[in-house]
Amino acid sequence: MTAVSVTDGLAYGLRTVAVFGILLTVAAVLTVVGTNMATTARTYGLYGGGMDWGQFVLGAVLSLTGGLTLYAGSMGLLYKVVADGVRRGNSRAV
């Protein structure tokens, strides 16, 4: 624990939380917009209802993109934290 000072640890943690907050915001916006588009794709016309398949598919793709963005970003952030820890440990061991 002596390899990292308290202020360095707090600064790194705050930067990590800020990156995750931005990632979560982008993923949430994509997912909410996509879900809203997919659920409102049903049209009500004069001769009966139908489905706007273009809007439905685009909404589903946006929703899936939001979920994948959150997953990939989380895994990338975890990889960065582990890699930074290994780098810091290796530089202090030499």
Image (cartoon, grey):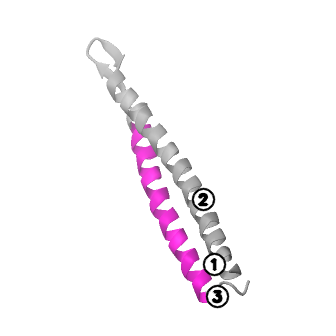
Which residue does the image show at 52% across and 54% down from the upper left?
A: 73
N-terminal-most mark, 1 or 2: 2
Report the disc number at residue 38. none
- 29 displayed left or right of 85: left
Q: Along the horizontal axis of the image, is 89 left or right of 8? A: right
Magenta segment? 7-36
Q: Name the residue tied to disc 3.
A: 6
- Residue that badge 1 annotates: 91
Callout 1 secondary element: helix
Q: Amino acid at mark 1?
A: Ser
| Total marks in image | 3
What is the C-alpha distance between the residues marked 2 and 3? 22 Å
Q: Quadrant of residue 90?
A: bottom right
In the rendered image, the residue lying farthest to the left is 46
Residue 29 vs 4, above or below: the answer is above
Taking the spot 51% from the left edge, 43% from the top edge, the residue there is: 68
Label 1 Cα neighbours within 10 Å, binned few <14 / some 14-19 / many ≥20: few
Q: Is residue 69 visible?
A: yes
Residue 79: which numbered mark, if any?
2
